[in-house]
Image (tube, helix red, strand yellow):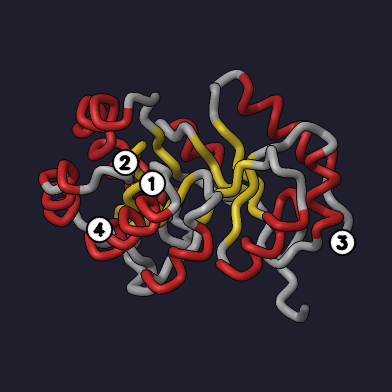
Amino acid sequence: MPVNTIAYHRIVKELASTKTCLIAVSKTKPNEDLMELYHLGQRDFGENYVQELVDKAAALPKDIRWHFIGHLQSNKVKYIAPFVHLIHGVDSLKLLQEINKQAIKNNRVIDCLLQIHIAEEESKFGLDERELEEIITQMDQLSNVRICGLMGMASFSKDQMKVRNEFKYLNSLFTKNTSWILEHSGKEPVLSMGMSGDYAMAIEEGSTMVRIGSLLFGARNYTN
């Protein structure tokens, strides 16, 4: 399926008025598809698989900002630590400690988002409110990671009110911790929530970064 450039231009125009950052989720898609959006000005791309991210980063332009948006295993951090722009799904202190370790080895400070569990599905990863608070109290020990905000994935549900309430809950935690995030990171705090099916609602509920794949690239291809 060709890249939907019409949808891309429409989404970019929508997001411009809200200053929301678009992450083009390019997992399983060929480099040619990414380059089509690159030539239209897109620079932020999101990948779920470490090896695929490493391969694409080696082959594609160096000014691309690579976002790792999948569930990251501690033993895979070393492969993306040299270049990753933002790690979205940090869901444990153990993972943060490993990111910090690899960041030191690469003489970098790596930006991260803490993933909050807001959906009812058990398959979704993330921290609860107590775990979030525990990590925040220990951040002074981690010199080479920078918490830039929060991230969450809503339930895969047709119940719009349910999804909206999950976004509202995440925004409430974000608002509660915005001052700390700003002081810690020195950057405008990021709230990453919303995907192809619910990004408009997520923006209404305060999202500053959306992760959109299928609207741009079509369905995922797992046969390659």
Provide the residue designation for mark 4.
127
- Give the alpha-carbon distance from disc 3 to disc 1, as whole Å: 32 Å
Mark 3 and mark 1 lie on one chain; the one further toward the N terminus is 3
- The residue under label 2 is which amino acid type? Ile
Camera-side mark, 4 or 1:
1
Provide the residue designation for mark 3.
1
- Give the alpha-carbon distance from disc 4 to disc 1, as whole Å: 14 Å
- Give the alpha-carbon distance from disc 2 to disc 3, as whole Å: 37 Å
Q: In this rendering, would 15 be left or right of 138? A: right
Provide the residue designation for mark 1.
112
Work out which residue is located at the far bottom of the displayed protein and give it: 223
Residue found at x 69% / y 34%: 11
- The residue under label 1 is which amino acid type? Cys
Q: In this rendering, would 28 be left or right of 91? A: right
Q: Measuring from the top left, give residue 214's x and y in whole percent.
A: 70, 56
Mark 2 and mark 3 lie on one chain; the one further toward the N terminus is 3
Mark 4 and mark 1 lie on one chain; the one further toward the N terminus is 1
Provide the residue designation for mark 2.
147
- Viewport quadrant of the N terminus: bottom right
Q: Local crowd at mark 3 within 10 Å, few (<14), some, or many (≥20)?
A: few
